[in-house]
Image (spheres, helix red, strand yellow):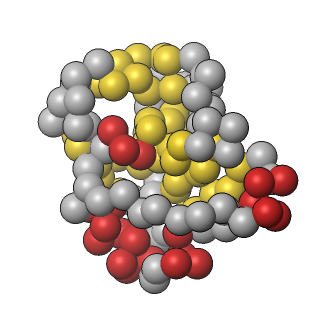
Amino acid sequence: MRSISRWASAATSAAMLTMGLTVLATPTASAAASAATATTMNGPCVYHVRYNGTPVQENPDTDSIARKYKNARERVTGPCKAQYDTEGATWFTAVDCSCASQGKAWIRSYWLY
């Protein structure tokens, strides 16, 4: 999978993420060969957590260690970056977190709105 911008403009993608909609796309053969694909938009992003006990993970990987947990309606900020984990078939969104080694942690995109 390349990026959200391949199927929609950055403004449309941002609006869809803000409204909590999921952008669905069919991966291509070349995308299946890559380990992960990243999408970045300019400016800081603000998200809210959808569910209680949402894990904040060290890496954008379904098997990554949970560094902390967030509860429903908590506000998180991040650098407007999303990454697709092809093994877990899941999008992850980068969030700012002092709990992670680089100051950036990851939450599954569908757990945010």
Query: How many tags in the picture?
Result: 0
**Residue drawn at (59%, 64%) of the image:** 26
Is 54 on the left-hand or right-hand side of 39? left
Instruction: Give the quarter of the figure containing the N terminus.
Output: bottom right
Please state the horizontal and vertical placement of residue 108, each as a whole percent of the image.
44, 38
Position of residue 80 measured from the top left corner of the image (x, y, whole percent): 45, 58
Q: Is residue 83 visible?
A: yes
Residue depicted at 53% across the width and 65% down the height: 25
Location of residue 52 in the rendering, given as x and y in whole percent from the top left corner? 22, 22
Residue 30 placement: quadrant: bottom right
In the depicted structure, whether residue 18 falls above or below residue 67: below
* Left or right, 113 with reference to 44: left
Percent position of residue 4, x then y: 53, 69
Q: Is residue 98 visible?
A: no
> Residue at point 41% right, 46% down?
109
Q: Nearer the viewer, residue 7 or 56?
A: 7
Residue at the image position 77 percent from the left and 46 percent from the top: 35
Foreground residue among 9 and 26 = 26
Q: Is residue 85 above or below residue 8?
A: above
